[in-house]
Structures are given as structure tokens and as C-alpha cells.
């Protein structure tokens, strides 16, 4: 009987000293040696598990955390709002009041851009093949690509994009380059973006070189340098494509159309006041009246007209066909007159200044007011 009591006491003692991961008497320790990097403005989580000693554990943290992160029960989480390197020390104490500490350096960086991965045959072939283009798991709202496909002819009819990608595509057979501008109707978080069939001109090992620029969930570019492209012309550009994607399958906001109309009529109206102001003097009055010779009054009238146009620039209406909904018909109109100009414009395009004489505005106003029938200057598809 006495032996049984001793055995039971020994078993209880061993259970108290034991842990889930080790045997009796294993020393207390923190099992990770580094903290994963955090990215500015993105959700972060890191755990600092312990083993050994006597459970339960109690955690403490020493050092300064970046704004937006919190430490609770061995778990670091939140959305960091400042960059830098932060030295922290995690202290764990077990039920027997034994403590261990480990120091870490937490790096908070700018988010890296998505990585474009291209799946193509790895050995020589002369048979047509499907190339699959995927993005790593980074949030993206838009992208610009220029692919060099030497001795590989793309079958543009086979192009298949992710459902949320609105795109404009152009192939230059002479330079063997494929340009693609795309905007997502909702934030893309990684996966297949598009696939395309290529036909080799001869037996070769396929190679595709890519210049890329990606935009984050807020519409800001991950990198400042866009693909290098030759200059071209067109009524619409990358910003209009992004605006169209943002309004996809929705009715555009009413103020957009209303804001565009006043900008067209405001320019001629601004040209009128100079004669009435100049009419108060004996010599200045005749100069502005003809409207052909430049004068100080005309220049003053032209300045506010340009300012008014610049203010109206963000009022691009993505409902190009005017049917009340932004859909595939509007995308097709945009493709027919799209410019892949070098780098594109990362801000809404400015409305051209209306000249003072009043003879030029009608032809200039006609350009933005008639988006339903754009001239076919670019074979985007």
C-alpha cells in the first residue's frame, strides 16, 4: 500500500514537470529564432511558441513595436503603419516561475511587387503550346506588360484572361513584342492571370522576356518604371482603362457626366469677359475685340479657362456608349482608340486649354464629347 502511494506521487511529479513536446525536465525555451518580415499597410501575424518547463506560460514583450502592431499571448499581429527595423525581446515565464528570453529584429518594409511567372516548355519544341502567366500572392489592381517573344508567334484569338481582368492587347509582328495593359474589377490576390497559345517559327527552346509594372490595391505603382514602349496616339490611355474597371457593371456616378459638360461650355464663356473689362479704357478696348491679336486681357482670360479644364480632368465618363451601364461595349470602344504611350499617365489626363479667340474650342470640345464613335487608330483586341 505504501509502495502504491509512492508510485502515484512520483507519477504526479513527472506529469507536473512534463510538457506536450518534450519529456520530464526539458528546459524552457522559445522555439523560433527569427521574426518574419512585415509589409507596410498589410496584415501581419507572427507566433513565438515555447516548449519545456511547466505549463501554462506567460508572455511579455520588451522593446518598441511599430505603430499598428500588438503583442498578446505570444502572438504579434496587426497592420504596421511605419517602416524600419525594430529590436524586440520576447520573454516567456512558466508556472514554476522559470523564465527565458529571445531577442528578435522585426523589419517592416515596403510591399514587394507581385512576381510574374511564365509556364512554358522547358525543352526544345516546334509544336504549338499554351503559355500560362500567373502572379504571386500579392494584391494587385492593375498591370502593364511588354513581352518579347522572339520566334514565337502568338495566337491572339486563343487569349484567355482571368474573369476580373479587363485588358487591351497589341502585337507587333516586326518587333515580336506583345503589349498588354490590364485593370482588375476587384483586387487580384494571385493566381493565373491569362494564358495564350504560341507557335514556334522553328524548333527551339521557348523564351519569353517580360517588362512589368504592377499597381497595389490602392492603385499606387509598386515600381515607378513602366515598360519601355514606342510612342503612339489614342484618345484613351491606361488611366481611362482603370477608371472603366472601377465602374465595371455599375452605373457611373451622376456628377461625372454633369462635370464634363460644364467644362466644355466654360471655356468659351471665359473668353467673353476681356472685351467688357477692356471697354473701360480708351486704348485696350480695340485689342481684345477682334480676337485675333494676342493681348494682356486675352492671356488673363486664357489662364482661368485652362484652370477650369484642369479641374474637370478627373470627370472621365467610362460609360462611353451612353447606355447607362459600364460593360463590354464600353471596353471595346476604349480598345479601338487606345494609346500604349511610353509609361502612360499615372494621373488623369489634363483637358487641353481653350484658346482665347473662341474659334478653336468647337473642334477641341468635339473630341471628348463624342466617345461613342472613336477613330480606329489602334488595333487593340
Image (tube, rainbow, N blue to C red):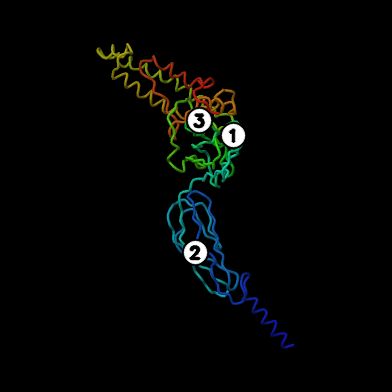
**10 Å neighbourhood of mark 2: few (<14), some, or many (≥20)?**
many
Look at mark 1 in the image and give the residue it sits on.
159
Whole-percent x and y of residue 181?
A: 51, 34
Asked whether the beta carbons under mark 2 and mark 1 sit within 8 Å of each other, the answer is no
Q: Residue furthest right?
A: 1
Asked whether the beta carbons under mark 2 and mark 3 sit within 8 Å of each other, the answer is no
In the visual, does 260 lie left or right of 18?
A: left
Alpha carbons under labels 2 and 3: distance apart? 61 Å
Q: In the structure shown, which secondary structural element does the residue marked by tag 3 occupy?
A: loop
Whole-percent x and y of residue 104?
A: 47, 63
Q: In the structure shown, which secondary structural element does the residue marked by tag 1 occupy?
A: strand
Looking at the picture, does residue 59 appear above or below residue 8?
above
Looking at the picture, does residue 103 appear above or below residue 313?
below
* Quadrant position of the N terminus in the picture: bottom right
Chain-order first, disc 2 or disc 3: 2
Q: In the structure shown, which secondary structural element does the residue marked by tag 2 occupy?
A: strand
Asked whether the beta carbons under mark 1 and mark 3 sit within 8 Å of each other, the answer is no
Look at mark 2 in the image and give the residue it sits on.
61
Front residue of this view, candidates 293 and 228: 228
Chain-order first, disc 1 or disc 3: 1
Residue drawn at point x = 45 percent, y = 20 percent? 264
* Quadrant position of the C terminus in the picture: top right
Q: Which mark is residue 173?
A: 3
Residue drawn at point x = 44 percent, y = 61 percent? 87
Whole-percent x and y of residue 292?
A: 32, 13
Query: How many circles with numbers are drawn on the protein?
Result: 3
In the visual, does 186 lie left or right of 352?
A: right
Amino acid at each position: 500500500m505504501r509502495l502504491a502511494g509512492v508510485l502515484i506521487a512520483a507519477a504526479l511529479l513527472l506529469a507536473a514537470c512534463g510538457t506536450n513536446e518534450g519529456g520530464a525536465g526539458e528546459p524552457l525555451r522559445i522555439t523560433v529564432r527569427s521574426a518574419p518580415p512585415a509589409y507596410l499597410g498589410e496584415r501581419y501575424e507572427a507566433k513565438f511558441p515555447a516548449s519545456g518547463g511547466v505549463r501554462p506560460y506567460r508572455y511579455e514583450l520588451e522593446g518598441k513595436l511599430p505603430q499598428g502592431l500588438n503583442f498578446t499571448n505570444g502572438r504579434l499581429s496587426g497592420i504596421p503603419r511605419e517602416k524600419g527595423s525594430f529590436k524586440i525581446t520576447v520573454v516567456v515565464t512558466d508556472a514554476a516561475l522559470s523564465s527565458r528570453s529571445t531577442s528578435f529584429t522585426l523589419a517592416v518594409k515596403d510591399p514587394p511587387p507581385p512576381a510574374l511567372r511564365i509556364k512554358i516548355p522547358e525543352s526544345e519544341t516546334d509544336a504549338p503550346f499554351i503559355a500560362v502567366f500567373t502572379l504571386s500572392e500579392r494584391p494587385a489592381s492593375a498591370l502593364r506588360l511588354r513581352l518579347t517573344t522572339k520566334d514565337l508567334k502568338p495566337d491572339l484569338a486563343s487569349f484567355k484572361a482571368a474573369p476580373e481582368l479587363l485588358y487591351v492587347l497589341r502585337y507587333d509582328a516586326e518587333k515580336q513584342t506583345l503589349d498588354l495593359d490590364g485593370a482588375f474589377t476587384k483586387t487580384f490576390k494571385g493566381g493565373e492571370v491569362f494564358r495564350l497559345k504560341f507557335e514556334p517559327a522553328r524548333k527551339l527552346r521557348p523564351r519569353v522576356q517580360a517588362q512589368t509594372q504592377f499597381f497595389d490595391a490602392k492603385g499606387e505603382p509598386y515600381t515607378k518604371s513602366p515598360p519601355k514602349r514606342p510612342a503612339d496616339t489614342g484618345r484613351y490611355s491606361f488611366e481611362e482603362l482603370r477608371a472603366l474597371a472601377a465602374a465595371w457593371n455599375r452605373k457611373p456616378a451622376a456628377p461625372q457626366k454633369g462635370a464634363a459638360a460644364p467644362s466644355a461650355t466654360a471655356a468659351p464663356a471665359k473668353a467673353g469677359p476681356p472685351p467688357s473689362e477692356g471697354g473701360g479704357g480708351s486704348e485696350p478696348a480695340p485689342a481684345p475685340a477682334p480676337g485675333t491679336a494676342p493681348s494682356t486681357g486675352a492671356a488673363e482670360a486664357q489662364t482661368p479657362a485652362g484652370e477650369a479644364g484642369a479641374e474637370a480632368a478627373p470627370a472621365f465618363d467610362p460609360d462611353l456608349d451612353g447606355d447607362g451601364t459600364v460593360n463590354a461595349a464600353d471596353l471595346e470602344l476604349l480598345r479601338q482608340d487606345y494609346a500604349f504611350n511610353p509609361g502612360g499617365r499615372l494621373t488623369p489626363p489634363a483637358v487641353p486649354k481653350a484658346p482665347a479667340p473662341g474659334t478653336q474650342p468647337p473642334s477641341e470640345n468635339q473630341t471628348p464629347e463624342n466617345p461613342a464613335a472613336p477613330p480606329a487608330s489602334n488595333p487593340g483586341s
